[in-house]
Structure formats: C-alpha cells, structure tokens
Amino acid sequence: MTGTEPRVGEHVPLTPGWTCGTCGDEWPCVTKRRRLLEEYQVDRAMLSVYLGSCLAAASQDLRPPAGTSLQERFIGWLPRASRP
C-alpha cells in the first residue's frame, strides 16, 4: 500500500459513481457524515468548502434522477448554525 491509498474503513468516495468505497452507499454515507462532523467540529466553514468542492466534482460525473438533488446529498445534511 502506498501513501496515497486510503486506509481500510475510511469511507472514501469511488468515482465516477460517488459511492462509498467501504459500505457501498451513496457518498457521503452516514458513517462518513458523522466522521466529517467530528473532524471539522471547530471549522464548519471549511467543511462546507470541502463538501462544495466534492459537489462540484460529482456534478460533472453524476446525473441524478428526477426529484433528487446533489446539493441535498452533499451539503443539505449539514447542521445549520443556531442564531443567538
């Protein structure tokens, strides 16, 4: 294994289908979403930037069926900031 290969269980996307390489669900899968929220807990803006770049790349590869939204899939699940 080289330094560029993902570790087992990382839940990385397989392109061009954008499925999870570990569990086979649509990426980001439930496990990856949870891990991303933990990893970016102090910088949610950067999480949005990262997922936005993934959305841009996926939009080149995927043509979602009618009634589905790639935006919802990639960033719609993010918690909204609470207002004071």
Image (tube, grey):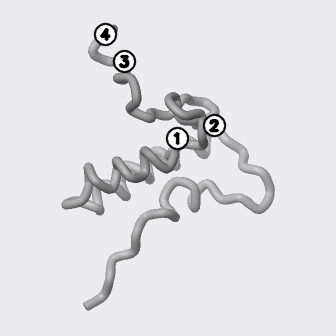
User: In this rendering, would 25 be left or right of 3?
Assistant: right
The residue positioned 44% from the left and 46% from the top of the image is 31
Helix, strand or loop under label 4:
loop
Callout 3, which amino acid?
Answer: Glu
User: In this rendering, would 73 be left or right of 48?
Assistant: right
On the image, numbered disc 2 is attached to which residue?
Answer: 61
Residue 1 in the image, given as x and y percentages of width and height? 33, 8
On the image, numbered disc 4 is attached to which residue?
Answer: 2
On the image, numbered disc 3 is attached to which residue?
Answer: 5
Above or below, 72 against 34 in this view is: below
Residue 69 in the image, given as x and y percentages of width and height? 66, 59
Depth check, mark 1 against mark 3: the one in front is 3
Helix, strand or loop under label 1:
helix
Residue 80 in the image, given as x and y percentages of width and height? 39, 74
Tag 3 and tag 4, C-beta contact below 8 Å: yes
Tag 1 and tag 2, C-beta contact below 8 Å: yes
Among numbered discs 4 and 2, the one appearing first in the sequence: 4
Depth check, mark 4 against mark 2: the one in front is 4
Answer with the quarter of the image where residue 82 lies: bottom left
On the image, numbered disc 1 is attached to which residue?
Answer: 57
